[in-house]
Amino acid sequence: MLARKSIYTLRETHLSPSLSLSYNEPLHIVKGEGQYLYDAEGYQYLDAVNNIQHVGHCHPKVVAAAQLQYEKLNINTRYLDETIVNYAQKLTDKMPAGLDVCFFTNSGSEANDLALRIARHVTQSKETIVLDAAYHGNLSSLIEISPYKHNGKGGSGAPDFVHTVPMPDSFRGKYRGKDSGTAYANEVQILLDEIQESGKQVSVFIAESLMGCGGQLVPPQGFLKESFQKVRKAGGLCIADEVQIGFGRMGDHFWGFETQDIVPDIVTMGKPMGNGHPLSAVVTTKAIADEFNNGMEYFNSFGGNPVSCAVGHAVLNVIEDEGLQQNAKDVGKYLKSLLNELKEKYSMIGDVRGHGLFLGIELVRDLESLDPADKEAYQIENAMKEKGILISTDGPDHNILKIKPPLVFNRENALFLAETLDEILS
Ligand code: PMP
């Protein structure tokens, strides 16, 4: 096994310098199992951050499904193949009626890029409404619509067809309190009016129903519902980006958009879908898919290959067989209650939020100014790691502790996390 220092040197020499490493002392992880990761010295970490390995690291049933299909056949989608249709049927069974048609892709970015292309074709427009601080992917088309990137380091701002709604942050945002949904939706209306006044037509509104990179932000109830109504009235389509939050993580619901009582025109998904295998999708209605079918073939060399579909199918089976959505609900509720107890104890915790096993803790310097405690968040993230628990920080001010573990996370893990955080905060 290469020593940690050699890996570091080779990385510096041969990998893109734009890549980053987590933690002040990067980890050399060599093994994963369930909700645990192990470093080269055999030290065990409780993984409370890697939501991609949704049903647990290296789940044996997912690994077996991949291996079995790999030994038999792996080919593109231009042949009749039962793995893809069986999987598409199973996946769309999880969707509200009408969202029946799948396009398979290989990353969340690819799914979002395709979703935009579909929307632009259908509406014959590019005018896009996005949430401030949102992240939708690493492709050029998505940096353009991701304020998290184009307004961040190295970014060059939004192009003129991108219209940005203030982040629907009811804790520290432009409008506050749980009844601020309508005020934020009115901001969407302002943008729609501006688009119309400039003689253009809205194409699409894209949003996560619970913002990930935006800081585990739960929008105030009604915001998305009212925004969808306004966008549709103006002739636009609505995309729900489920890349972070889909597949049962919300606990009460299988999809994030269900927590907001909305039905999108187009849904994009990725990360947890293949438990780490590159698999993503766009799901939409037959009518929209038919309209997009303008003669230009949609072909994707890897998207929808039998191995990916076998993996995706196994992930859905494991979620069901092991009751992982219910577990996300139960353990998430328990963990949130423990974190709320800490909120009573420490004024640095301004807000505890999220659904199921997608939780955020907003750290502030004091409860009056709500000054973001970014350096403190980074210190806590590293101190947690020293104590064997992996979490991360995010949000536009880098002051949110993010918790989004594999869904096999149990009550004992939740208690360990809360007790360790208590110890560090004290
Ligand atoms: N959408 C959201 C909400 C994401 O969080 C991400 C990745 N962090 C993406 C899209 C892009 O997914 P990928 O990295 O698989 O391209």
Image (spheres, rainbow, N blue to C red):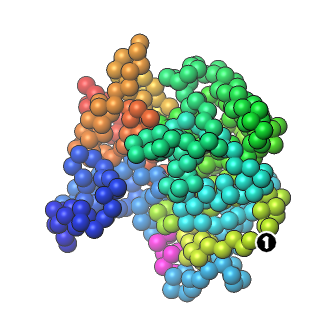
Around disc 1, counting alpha carbons within 10 Å, would you say few (fewer than 14), some (14 to 19), or many (20 or more)? Answer: few
Element class at badge 1? loop
Task: Look at the image and tell me whether residue 90 can be seen.
Answer: no
Residue 123: % across, % down: 78, 51
Specify whether residue 63 is painted magenta: yes
Tell me the kind of residue under disc 1. Answer: Gly
Task: Give the residues in magenta.
Answer: 61-68
Residue beneath label 1, please? 295
The image quadrant where one finds the N terminus is: bottom left
Residue 77: % across, % down: 66, 78
Residue at 26% across, 41% down:
382
In the figure, is residue 91 to the left or right of 408?
right
Residue 70: % across, % down: 51, 82
Residue at 35% across, 35% down:
418
Q: Give the mark count.
A: 1
Q: State whether the magenta stretch is mostly helix, strand or loop.
A: helix
Specify whether residue 204 is painted magenta: no
Identify the residue at the far bottom of this view.
72
The foreground one among 278 and 10 is 10
361 in relation to 152, above or below: above
In the figure, is residue 73 to the left or right of 368?
right
